Every structure is written in structure tokens, then in C-alpha cells.
């Protein structure tokens, strides 16, 4: 099977769905490659190249380059979705959420409910997340927890290329608004991805490692760190790594079944600790799986501060394999 | 004297295998072994299986200890006669290790990966292994499987014979267009493939539904079939485990996939996490579930096998054999009873519906013997 990067996998998913279904359109800043510039239209294709080549294939009526106005992008996409298109709208960096959140959480997410089930909103919002590029506090957050808390939004946090393609196709075919979080630092991560179209259902976690001693639940880029720790400790501590793949819906059953087996839980989340997915999953297990636990739950998160710009500080700020290993050893010692 | 030293090397089981671990040695150094003796258990990311010695003599050296991992083609042990000196064995090992270059992923894929072919208006995936000449062996998998089902058979038989393994329509990497989904449509796809791949005549090895297709093809076009090996074939009786068929079509979650896969084998532990993952990945492809539904509806209406081919087996004149696992829970081994004279029947103990995987060495020998006799 061909090996593809997450970037290629998402591009392929968009291309295949746009080919299959003429209602699928892409809209956002620079999705066509910056029409204000010189040179060929699809020279770039999104700031990190994910939509590269789409305008050449599908034209400007289906790959809509917009001005810098996130509220208009999200409003137009929500309206288009509720009136028959299936837009994939790009909110370039999730940090820009603040200028357009009304269109997402109070409009798109509520349409089905407000219209008594008579309207569907097949909208996908693609957005980039994550620190590690020294892009400073306003371009480095993850923020998936702020979307996950909204009923009516589905939230996808892929960690590998196989999942990214199947989850993106699922997102486009879904009749509800889906927010798709792409971590900037793993775009080049490769895995085997079928050329054919396929879907991965939402709310089904993936076990990236199987083990008996400790459950590590990790999201997006953190899955790779958790896998690294599981492999590093394999001879002394048997770690199971759960990648929920979607934070909403969340596969609580798989997390609880794993903790029932291991009795120990470490949750790894790149977000700030308060009201995070780490806190949410820890609460879930404390609430519904307390009797399984042999040790207190550990959370590995960023601290409660903005993401630092200074590379040395940012490195200290982010969760990493060493911090995860320390947490795993701590729950084993209790 | 070094001509009588035979290296035992890491086999390649399946397309994605790049290395394997010696899980357990089953014979001690110094033991006399015959070809086909189970000498070790090898564990890969996909599967654990016993490895049968390709050579006879004395196992002079266990080069890799238990727990050791080596690339495909790497040296595991050395078999030689007792007349070969230890110094010669040492020299052989040293030379082998010095010259051994593990296959790189790229050259591996190019050299031995599957290919696509346009046949009868469809794209079909197939894997060709072994020498170019001679009447090839053509492997036809069963319901829901793909050419990877032959991972323990095709490489072994390809040492002497040209071999092809095919993904049927609706399966593996082939087009998911199954036409009507009935046997006639699938048999036509096989003949289309044979024509497209310039296979005038072949030794057919078919498993389960693929066995019924092979038999149907032998009935329709006997001149193209040199011999017929049917492994737990459909078509020889009415019974079929619909809990498996329906469960397989329905399975979307890991637990469901595991439950149905376990029905296939005598020893449930043979079902690995990777096999479950592979099934789920296959099931998620666009078009797969409707294709499987169409095939199941055509083959098993009302929970019984529709096509009955005992007469076709009796009428056929090419060498033919039937192999079954005694513990088969999908199609009962009782269907191997009362077959026409002239059909060799081998019912294997401790095997379920996948004897070609569970008892691969024995099945490979039976196939090789029939092919040689033909």
C-alpha cells in the first residue's frame, strides 16, 4: 500500500470527494494559493499546502479564495451548508476562532436544533493546531476543547495519515458540522493509505499500542509521543495507547475498557490544563471507572500560560515523551 | 563440502513483512530434521506461525536466539550433514552474514509487490511470484479475503513454480464492482484475468467460495485447468455458517471483527490485532459492504449454499484434490465425505476453515505433489 503524509492524505480526501460530489466546495484564505500574488493560481494551496492543486482541477467556483475575514468565511459556509452545498471551510489557525465563533457555535451548531430537525448543516471546518514551530502565543494553540464543549459540533483530531483520510471523507459525508483539527507538526508524518476512498466512523478510538499496565490516552501529535514512551518502556512497563481520534463524539467505552484492564491512566493533552480534554477524560474515568483504578490519574498537559515564543521556553512548555514517561512511572509507583 | 550446507532464512509472509522474530525454537541444535519438520515459531507484526524446515539434515546451528529479530532473508539457522565440519559451518555463517543485504522497502515493493491489471473492464490486483515459465499456479481466495490469504503458500510454492494470486472483484485492491455478485460474474472475472495476464492454463487453488469458483471454472473451461486443489470449498453441500457471513458483512468495530475472525480458525490465538485491523480497513473502503452483500445474497440465499457442484467435481478429469480442516466452523468438513472416486481427500486435524494458513506446510506439500503429478 502506498505511503502518504497526512498532508497528502487530506488533499487526496478533498480531491476524491470533490470529484464524487459536485456539492463539495472549498472556501478559505489562501486555499487557492494567494490570488493577490503573481504566478500560477495553485502555486501554494493553503499556507501549508494542504489544498494544493485543487483550484487547477476544480476551478475558482469550487475553490473559493476569500479575503481575510474569518466571520464571513464561516458565515458563508454555514449558510451554504444549510442550503444544499457541502462546504469545507478553512479557519487557517484555530487561534482565529475568536473572530468567527458566533457563526460556528451559535449558528452552524444550532441549525438542526433550532429548525426542529428540518435542516442539516453538512459543513466541515478545517483548522490547524499546535505548538512547536515558535509561532508565538497567537498561532500555536490547540483549542479543540473549546469546540468539543459545544453540542452540535463533531470534533476530529487525527494523528496519522490513514486516519486523516478516512476521517476527512467521513466528515464531508456527515450531515452535521464537523471541525477537523490538523496538527502543524505532523503534516509530514507518513503511513500506509489506500488510494481508494474509505470512511472511519466517528467515536471509535484506535489502540495504537496494546498493553496491560498503564493506559495512556493521547490526542493528535501527542499520540506519537505516547507511542514512543510505550516502545521505550516496553521491556519494563506494558503501556496501552488509546487514540480517541474524535473528541466529540468521544469513545468512552474504549477508554473505560482499557482502564478496567490496566487500572492506571495517564492522559496526554497539548492544551492548557483547565477545562481540557485531559481534565474531561480524567473526570470520565473518575466518574465511571473509579473502581478500576489502582493509582491516581495523571494528566500531562501544557501549563496554564500562553504558548511561549522563545524556542527554549516553548520546548519546556509542551508535553514531551520524558514528561509522559515520568507520569507513567508515577502511576506505576503508586 | 559447503554445497551441502543449507541456510534457514527468515521467510516473507505477506506483503508488508520486513522482519520477523524467532519466538521459539522447536528443535535443538544437533537434532536431525526432515524437510517439513516444524523447527521454529516466527512472530511478525501480523501473525505468529510455525516455520517448517525447507531442508533436511542436522540442525547444526541456531544462529538467531529466541527473541531475536532479523530482516526477511536473514540467516536463522544452518542445516547440514554431520560430515560437514564446524569450521566449515562457521565459515559459511561468516560469509552469509558478510554478504547479506536486507531488502530495502522500495526495492522490496518494486520486486515483489502486487500489480494492477485491466481485465474485462475492471481493474484487478494480483501478485505474481516465482519463475516465468511453466504452467502457473493460480490462487483464488474466499469470501471477504484477498491475495494476502496465501502469504504462507504463494512464496513457498513460488520457489519452484510460477504463481499468481488474484484479488477477486469486491475484494482487496481490486475494483469493488462485482456485477451481479453471482458465481458466473466472479468466474468471468477470473477468466478475464487469465486472458489479460496471458495465462493459457493454470493449476487452480481455490479456498472456500474461491474453491467453488475454481470448480465452476473447471466445469466451464476444463482445457485451461491443469489441476484443481479445493480447500474447504463451497459447492459440495448445503451448509454454510451464516453467523459468520452476516457477522462479517456487519462487522464495523474491532470486537465484532475479532468475533467473526475467530470462527475461521481452530486456535483463536491465531487471530492477531493486525488481522483485525486489516479486516476493518478493508471493510471501510467505499463499495466493499454492498459488494459483499451482493455476493452473499447470490451464493447463500436463505442461509444455504445455492450452487451445488458435486457433479462437476465428478465429471472433471484433471487431477483434483480436496483439503479440509476437521475443525472447520464455516463449512463443515462433512462436505468432504462421499466425494467421487478419483478425488483425493485430505482432512487435516487441528485446523479450522483456513488450513492453508493453519497447516501451511502440509497444504503446500499437497499442492506441490498434485502440481508435479499433473
Image: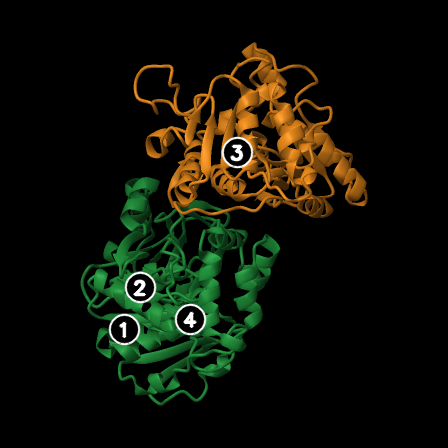
Q: Is residue B316 above or below residue B240?
A: below
Front tag of 1 and 3? 3
Mark 2 or mark 1: which comes first in sequence?
2
Q: Is residue B291 above or below residue A205?
A: below
Front tag of 4 and 1? 4
Label of residue B327 in the image: none
Do tags 2 and 1 sit on the same chain? yes
Chain appearing in orange on the rendered image: A
Give neighbour class at mark 1: few <14, some 14-19, many 20+ (Cα, 10 Å): many
Do tags 2 and 3 sit on the same chain? no
Tell me, what colour scheme is on the image? Answer: by chain
Mark 4 or mark 2: which comes first in sequence?
2
Question: SS class of the residue under badge 3?
Answer: helix
Please say if the residues under marks 2 and 1 sit with CB atoms less than 8 Å apart: yes
Distance of label 1 from label 3 (alpha carbons): 64 Å
Whether residue A158 is visible here, answered yes or no, is no
Do tags 1 and 3 sit on the same chain? no
Residue position marked by numbered label 3 in the rendering: A80
Q: Is residue B149 above or below residue B316?
A: above
Distance of label 4 from label 2 (alpha carbons): 22 Å
Q: Is residue A239 above or below residue B358?
A: above
Amino acid at each position: 500500500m502506498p505511503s502518504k503524509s497526512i498532508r497528502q492524505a487530506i488533499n487526496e480526501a478533498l480531491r476524491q470527494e470533490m470529484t464524487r460530489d459536485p456539492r463539495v466546495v472549498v472556501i478559505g484564505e489562501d486555499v487557492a494559493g494567494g490570488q493577490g500574488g503573481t504566478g500560477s493560481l495553485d502555486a501554494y494551496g493553503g499556507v501549508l499546502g494542504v489544498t494544493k492543486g485543487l483550484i487547477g482541477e476544480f476551478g475558482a467556483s469550487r475553490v473559493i479564495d476569500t479575503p481575510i475575514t474569518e466571520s464571513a468565511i464561516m458565515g458563508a459556509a454555514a449558510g451554504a451548508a444549510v442550503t444544499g452545498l457541502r462546504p469545507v471551510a478553512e479557519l487557517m489557525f484555530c487561534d482565529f476562532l475568536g473572530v468567527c465563533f458566533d457563526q460556528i457555535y451559535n449558528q452552524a451548531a444550532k441549525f438542526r436544533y433550532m429548525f426542529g430537525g428540518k435542516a442539516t448543516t453538512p459543513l466541515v471546518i478545517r483548522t490547524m493546531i499546535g505548538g512547536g514551530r515558535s509561532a508565538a502565543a497567537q498561532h500555536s494553540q490547540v483549542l479543540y476543547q473549546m469546540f468539543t464543549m459545544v453540542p452540535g459540533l463533531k470534533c476530529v483530531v487525527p494523528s496519522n495519515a490513514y486516519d486523516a483520510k478516512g476521517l476527512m471523507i467521513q466528515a464531508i459525508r456527515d450531515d452535521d458540522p464537523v471541525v477537523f483539527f490538523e496538527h502543524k507538526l505532523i503534516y509530514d508524518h507518513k503511513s500506509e493509505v489506500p488510494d481508494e476512498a474509505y470512511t472511519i466512523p466517528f467515536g471509535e478510538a484506535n489502540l495504537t499500542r496494546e498493553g496491560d499496565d498503564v493506559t495512556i490516552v493521547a490526542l493528535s501529535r501527542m499520540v506519537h509521543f505516547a507511542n514512543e514512551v510505550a516502545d521505550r518502556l516496553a521491556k519494563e512497563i506494558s503501556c496501552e495507547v488509546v487514540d480517541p481520534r474524535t473528541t466529540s463524539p468521544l469513545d468512552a467505552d474504549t477508554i473505560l475498557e482499557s482502564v478496567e484492564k490496566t487500572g492506571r491512566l495517564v492522559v496526554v493533552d497539548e492544551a492548557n490544563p483547565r477545562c481540557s480534554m485531559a481534565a474531561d477524560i480524567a473526570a470520565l474515568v473518575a466518574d465511571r471507572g473509579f473502581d478500576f483504578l489502582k493509582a491516581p490519574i495523571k494528566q500531562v498537559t501544557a501549563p496554564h500560560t500562553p504558548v511561549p515564543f522563545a524556542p527554549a521556553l516553548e520546548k519546556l512548555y509542551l508535553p514531551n515523551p520524558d514528561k509522559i514517561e515520568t507520569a507513567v512511572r508515577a502511576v506505576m509507583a503508586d | 563440502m559447503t554445497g551441502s550446507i543449507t541456510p534457514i532464512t527468515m521467510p516473507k509472509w505477506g506483503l508488508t513483512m520486513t522482519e520477523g522474530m524467532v519466538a521459539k525454537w522447536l528443535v535443538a541444535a544437533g537434532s536431525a530434521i526432515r524437510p517439513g519438520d516444524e523447527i521454529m515459531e516466527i512472530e511478525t507484526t501480523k501473525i505468529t506461525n510455525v516455520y517448517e524446515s525447507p531442508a533436511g539434515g542436522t540442525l547444526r546451528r541456531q544462529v538467531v536466539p529466541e527473541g531475536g529479530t532479523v530482516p526477511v532473508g536473514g540467516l536463522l539457522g544452518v542445516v547440514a550433514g554431520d560430515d560437514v565440519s564446524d569450521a566449515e559451518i562457521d565459515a559459511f555463517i561468516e560469509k552469509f552474514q558478510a554478504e547479506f543485504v536486507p531488502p530495502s522497502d522500495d526495492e522490496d515493493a518494486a520486486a515483489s509487490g502486487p500489480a494492477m491489471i485491466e481485465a474485462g473492464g475492471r481493474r484487478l490486483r494480483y501478485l505474481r511470484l516465482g519463475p516465468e515459465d511453466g504452467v502457473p499456479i493460480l490462487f483464488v481466495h474466499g469470501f471477504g479475503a484477498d491475495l494476502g490469504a496465501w502469504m504462507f503458500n504463494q512464496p513457498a510454492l513460488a520457489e519452484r513454480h510460477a504463481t499468481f494470486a488474484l484479488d477477486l472483484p469486491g475484494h482487496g485492491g481490486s475494483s469493488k464492482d462485482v456485477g451481479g455478485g453471482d458465481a458466473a460474474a466472479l468466474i468471468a472475472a477470473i477468466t478475464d484475468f487469465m486472458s489479460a495476464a496471458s495465462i493459457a492454463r493454470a493449476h487452480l487453488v481455490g479456498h472456500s467460495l474461491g474453491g467453488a469458483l475454481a470448480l465452476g471454472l473447471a466445469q466451464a473451461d476444463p482445457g485451461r485447468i491443469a489441476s484443481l486443489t479445493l480447500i474447504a470449498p463451497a459447492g459440495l453441500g448445503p451448509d454454510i455458517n451464516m453467523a459468520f457471513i452476516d457477522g462479517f458483512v456487519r462487522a464495523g468495530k474491532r470486537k465484532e471483527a475479532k468475533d467473526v475472525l475467530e470462527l475461521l480458525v481452530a486456535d483463536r490465538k491465531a487471530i492477531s490485532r493486525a488481522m483485525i485491523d486489516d479486516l476493518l480497513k478493508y471493510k471501510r473502503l467505499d463499495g466493499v459492504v454492498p459488494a459483499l452483500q451482493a455476493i452473499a445474497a447470490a451464493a447463500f440465499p436463505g442461509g444455504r449454499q445455492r450452487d451445488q457442484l458435486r457433479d462437476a467435481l465428478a465429471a472433471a478429469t484433471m487431477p483434483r484434490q480436496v483439503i479440509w480442516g476437521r475443525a472447520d466452523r464455516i463449512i463443515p468438513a462433512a462436505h468432504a465425505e462421499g466425494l467421487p472416486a478419483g478425488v483425493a481427500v485430505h482432512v487435516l486435524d487441528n485446523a479450522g476453515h483456513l488450513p492453508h494458513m493453519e497447516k501451511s506446510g502440509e497444504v503446500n506439500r499437497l499442492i506441490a505433489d498434485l502440481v508435479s503429478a499433473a
